[in-house]
Amino acid sequence: MPPKTKGKRKKVGAKKQNKNLGAGVEAEAERRLLLLEKELLQEHLALRRDEARQAKASEDRLKQRLQELEAELERARSEGKAIYAEMSRQHRALQAKMETSSKQMEEEVRSLREQLETCQREAQAAKEEAEHVLGERDHTLAQLRAHVADMEAKYEEILDGSLDQLLAKLRAIKPQWDAAALRLHSRHKEQLRQFGLNPLDL
């Protein structure tokens, strides 16, 4: 009975260890996924902030330039329509440049969003792969535990059979041992009588 109890305790300890290992692997996969999502969001936020700063700086520069142009235009009104037309042309060119820059920034934002979606899909695929690996590992462990239990049952059956055979042999040889002991006892009693001793007095 004590060896069987010890084996059961080992099984329970192994199950707890395997459960803790599985929980640890799953927690590590979740942690890596969260870190990846966090890094992606931080990069996305940093890019958006940088774009916002660049847009604000461009807007400030354009406003300053427009103010300068308006001041020059006001001073040049007296010089005629030719100068005024030139200044208007420059103003339209600056507006076109600002529209072009805005379109470029929109394209960059769209590209960054696509990259973010791709990273999210890859992270989801990595999570699913980790779950698949964990499932296969649990299945393998279950098979191994079943194999060990089967082997223990077979060893126990073999051990019980061997003990039964040994007991049967002992029972078969016991009459011979008893007869030999009786003959030896009788011989010693006879020797004691030859020396003039009574075996009952000893």
Image (tube, rainbow, N blue to C red):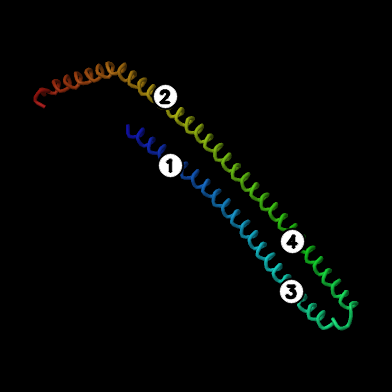
The residues tagged by marks 3 and 1 sit, at their Cα atoms, a distance apart of 69 Å
Image spot of residue 76 (x, y percent) = 85, 82
Q: Is residue 64 above or below residue 6?
A: below
Badge 2 is on which residue? 158
**Relative height, residue 12 to residue 25 (above, below):** above
Q: Give the crowd class for mark 1: few <14, some 14-19, many >=20 residues within 10 Å.
A: few
Are the two marked residues, 1 and 2, in contact with CB atoms closer than 8 angstroms?
Answer: no
- Residue closest to the eye, 6 or 90: 90
- Please give the name of the residue rendered at 85% of the width and 75% of the height, measured from the top-left corner: 87
The image's mark for residue 16 is 1
Q: Are marks 2 and 3 in contact (CB under 8 Å)?
A: no
- Identify the amino acid type marked 2: Ile
CA distance for labels 4 and 1? 55 Å
Please name the residue shown 47% across and 30% down the image: 146
* Closer to the eye: label 3 or 1: 3
Residue 169 picture location, percent across and down? 34, 19
Kindly report the distance in space between the C-alpha atoms of the residues bearing marks 3 and 4. Answer: 19 Å
Residue picked out by circle 3:
63
Callout 1: SS: helix
Query: At 75% from the left edge and 62% from the top edge, which residue is drawn?
Result: 102
Q: Nearer the viewer, mark 1 or mark 2?
A: 1
Of pointers 4 and 1, the one earlier in the residue sequence = 1
Identify the residue shown where x is 71% and y is 58%. 109
- Could you say whether the residue bearing mark 2 is in a helix, strand or loop? helix
Q: CA distance from mark 1 to mark 2?
A: 30 Å
Residue flagged by tag 1: what amino acid is it? Lys
Question: For the residue labelled by badge 4, is the local secondary structure a helix, a strand or a loop?
Answer: helix
